[in-house]
């Protein structure tokens, strides 16, 4: 089996790339990675070389190309992990897949108003729609941890694709100071203390520092 390749966006902004990258690293799957910086004049042109949807990430394995973060995670789980990235108990697995799909597809107001920006720390004013979605996110975390945590630190006890789907949302909830239940706050802190996520955040900080160094500050004088 040849080494797969992940085409991802930069660390600071690409929330979907974080989801796939985290799954690969958490289960120690060896892969090559090409990072394309977002919001550049040539970003779309570079992404188009790999992605039919003009979005990232893209996962390439032999002659197979998969795009969309949840579809990629499902492919990785089936091809490399013998389905270990979902809970093994049927009921927990059903709930985990439902939650993962909800996190992936819904929460459009939250994702627009509170996008993942790994180096931003700010208190945000919420629209009523965003506030409602934050309440639903709090309920998801609380109920999963309370009903399915089984003594582990993740949503369903052991790490799963559901945690991958929640990871960029957790970064945003923490950065923007969301008002959450104590159990949800504990989960977010545990997730953000995952060594792989800590490494991702460190790399995002380096990206920001490099961007600042490359700015021609004289034109602002």
Image (spheres, rainbow, N blue to C red):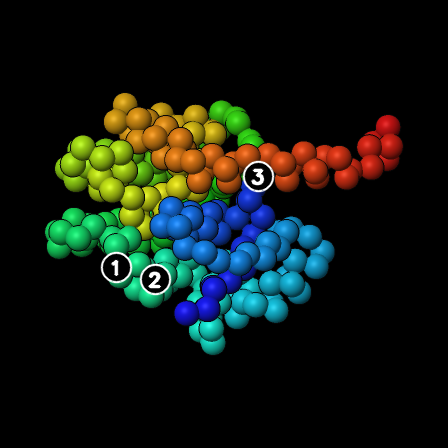
Q: Residue at x 55, y 34 (%)?
A: 202
Q: Secondary structure at mark 2?
A: helix
On the rendered structure, is 150 left or right of 83? left
Name the quadrant of the C terminus: top right
Q: Secondary structure at mark 3?
A: helix
The residue wearing badge 1 is: 83
Residue count near mark 3 (Cα–Cα under 10 Å), binned few <14, some 14–19, many ≥20: some
Residue 131, percent from left and from top: 37, 34
Q: Residue at x 30, y 59 (%)?
A: 81
Residue 35 - label = none
Of residues 192 and 109, the one drawn nearer to the viewer in this rendering: 192
Q: Residue at x 27, y 38 (%)?
A: 154
What's the CA distance linking mark 1 and mark 2?
8 Å
Name the quadrant of the N terminus: bottom left
The residue wearing badge 2 is: 80
The residue wearing badge 3 is: 203
């Amino acid at each position: 089996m040849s080494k797969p390749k992940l085409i991802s966006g930069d660390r600071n902004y690409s929330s979907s790339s974080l989801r796939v990258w985290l799954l690969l690293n958490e289960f120690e799957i060896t892969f090559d990675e090409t990072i394309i910086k977002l919001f550049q004049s040539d970003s779309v042109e570079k992404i188009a070389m790999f992605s039919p949807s003009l979005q990232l990430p893209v996962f390439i394995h032999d002659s197979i190309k998969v795009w969309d973060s949840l579809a990629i995670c499902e492919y990785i789980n089936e091809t490399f992990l013998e389905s270990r990235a979902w809970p093994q108990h049927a009921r927990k697995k059903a709930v985990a897949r439902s939650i993962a799909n909800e996190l992936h597809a819904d929460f459009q107001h939250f994702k627009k108003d509170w996008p993942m920006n790994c180096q931003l720390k700010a208190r945000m004013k919420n629209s009523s729609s965003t506030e409602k979605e934050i309440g639903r996110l709090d309920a998801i975390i609380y109920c999963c941890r309370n009903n399915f945590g089984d003594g582990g630190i993740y949503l369903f006890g052991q790490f799963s694709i559901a945690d991958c789907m929640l990871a960029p949302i957790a970064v945003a909830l923490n950065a923007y100071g969301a008002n959450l239940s104590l159990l949800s706050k504990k989960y977010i802190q545990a997730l953000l203390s995952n060594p792989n996520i800590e490494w991702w955040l460190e790399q995002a900080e380096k990206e920001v520092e490099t961007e600042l160094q490359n700015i021609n500050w004289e034109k602002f004088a």
